[in-house]
Image (cartoon, grey):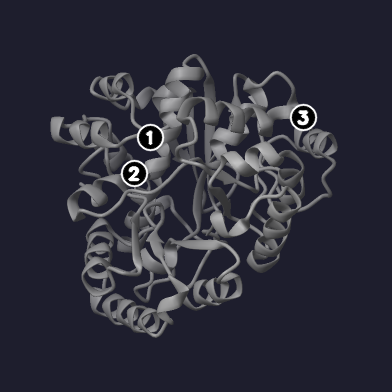
């Protein structure tokens, strides 16, 4: 089986889930799967994906895993106690052929947010690994090892003063669990001074590295339906996060409503309260320059803040970004597919995004074409009007 532990997911799923338990335990949501890669036929994978998800629904958290979570400073005891009772329920997930489009499959997750939030990452990892195994059955890790070694040699050329740090953010689109595990072990062994940790909690536990993560778009999107007023949804999300974590886990996600709207809402209070922000769409150099200027405008020293970059990064691009902002702000880099699925096989770009909360459409308006998420064009147009957004991206 491809998923062996419920910890085999990204840390931000647990940090968001804790907020859900404490603040929105009755919220009902819907997620939908999408393959952004054109021309991919996932229908031959359907039965195997279903079987893997059925196995996922048999898993429970083990006592040692719960003890590990309990030892994390920001995990609260009642939340870990709840996880001790948690088990996926297959009635909340439907996997089928798409009736209207050849080659597509549909995955819909619908139910209580508290009981469905953990589905996204393992289901995407299953789809990615099943597809890679079927599409390239002869693929050999030797090619991946050679490419990884080239990346390691490139990192070793970085000047020490740069304080260059990379993290693994590659669970969702990995080639395989075995390769993911090997990548982390190799980075820890070969370049420990450059390796900050991994978003994957199980592999962090197994490898003895730091688990990393704060919030994702689904949390920001859900607040469109959970907050008192749509225009204040972003501020409401940041306020609730601060209420839960009291200054811990202080990296704000900056592109749910476009960067311009983020800067309008990320006022002096949030500039001082949060440790930094994460870039996930749009030009990273422009983003960094504008965020540094925003900190300075709000009388905050950007050198004390962290700029995290995580949008389709390669190692050369990450190094170039680090050099641009060296001495002006702290930087860190979350590298996903280029790290865990660069083995000579063309990976697929798959996502599962929240589309409804409490029966109301929710959306993400991205700074990058193709990353806007909405199933309701009317609601998307209204959201753009409320936030004063230009028509960026595509649904």
Residue 14's label in the rendered image is 1
At mark 1, the secondary structure is helix
Residue carrying label 2: 9
Measured Cα–Cα span from mark 2 to mark 1: 9 Å
**Residue 121 at what x, y percent from top left?**
39, 44
| Residue occupying the point 33% across, 40% down | 50
- Pointers 3 and 2 in contact (CB under 8 A)? no
Q: CA distance from mark 3 to mark 2?
A: 32 Å
Name the one closer to the observer, 93 or 315: 315
Q: Image height check: is 359 above or below 284? A: above
Circle 3 or circle 2, nearest the eye:
3
Residue 182 in the image, given as x and y percentages of width and height: 22, 65
At a point 67% along the width and 48% down the height, the residue shown is: 372
Real-space CA distance between mark 3 and mark 1, rounded to the nearest whole angstrom = 27 Å
Res 64 → quadrant: top left
Q: Is disc 2 placed on a helix, strand or loop?
A: loop
Q: Nearer the viewer, residue 331 or 269?
A: 269
Q: Residue 213: tell me if it is visible.
A: yes
Dot 3 or dot 1: first in sequence order is 1
């Amino acid at each position: 089986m491809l998923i062996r532990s419920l910890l085999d997911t990204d840390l931000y799923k647990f940090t968001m889930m804790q907020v859900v338990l404490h603040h929105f335990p009755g919220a009902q949501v819907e997620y939908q799967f999408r393959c952004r890669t054109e021309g991919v036929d996932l229908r031959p994978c359907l039965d195997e994906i279903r079987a893997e998800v059925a196995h996922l629904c048999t898993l429970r958290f083990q006592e040692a895993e719960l003890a590990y979570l309990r030892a994390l400073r920001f995990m609260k005891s009642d939340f870990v106690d709840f996880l001790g009772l948690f088990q996926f329920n297959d009635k909340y997930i439907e996997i089928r052929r798409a009736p209207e489009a050849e080659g597509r499959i549909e995955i819909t997750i619908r139910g209580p947010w508290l009981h469905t939030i953990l589905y996204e990452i393992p289901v995407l990892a299953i789809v990615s690994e099943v597809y890679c195994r079927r599409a390239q059955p002869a693929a050999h890790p030797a090619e991946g090892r050679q490419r990884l070694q080239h990346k390691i040699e490139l990192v070793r050329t970085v000047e020490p003063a740069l304080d260059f740090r990379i993290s693994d953010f590659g669970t969702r689109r990995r080639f395989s669990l075995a390769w993911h595990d090997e990548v982390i072990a190799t980075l820890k062994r070969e370049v420990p001074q450059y390796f900050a940790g991994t978003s994957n909690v199980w592999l962090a536990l197994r490898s003895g590295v730091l688990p990393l993560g704060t919030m994702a778009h689904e949390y920001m999107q859900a607040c469109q339906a959970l907050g008192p007023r749509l225009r204040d949804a972003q501020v409401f999300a940041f306020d609730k996060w601060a209420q839960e974590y009291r200054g811990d886990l202080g990296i704000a996600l900056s592109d749910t409503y476009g960067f311009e709207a983020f800067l309008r809402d990320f006022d002096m209070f949030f500039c001082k309260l949060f440790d930094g922000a994460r870039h996930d769409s749009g030009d990273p150099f422009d983003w960094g320059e504008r965020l540094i200027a925003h900190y300075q405008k709000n009388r905050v020293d950007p050198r004390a803040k962290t700029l995290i970059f995580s949008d389709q990064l390669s190692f050369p691009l990450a190094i170039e970004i680090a050099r641009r902002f060296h001495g002006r702000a702290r930087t860190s880099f979350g590298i996903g597919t280029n790290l865990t699925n660069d083995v000579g096989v063309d990976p697929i770009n798959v996502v599962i995004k929240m589309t409804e909360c409490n029966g109301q459409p929710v959306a993400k308006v991205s700074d990058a074409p193709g990353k806007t998420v909405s199933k309701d064009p009317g609601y998307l147009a209204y959201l753009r009007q409320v936030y004063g957004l230009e028509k960026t991206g595509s649904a």
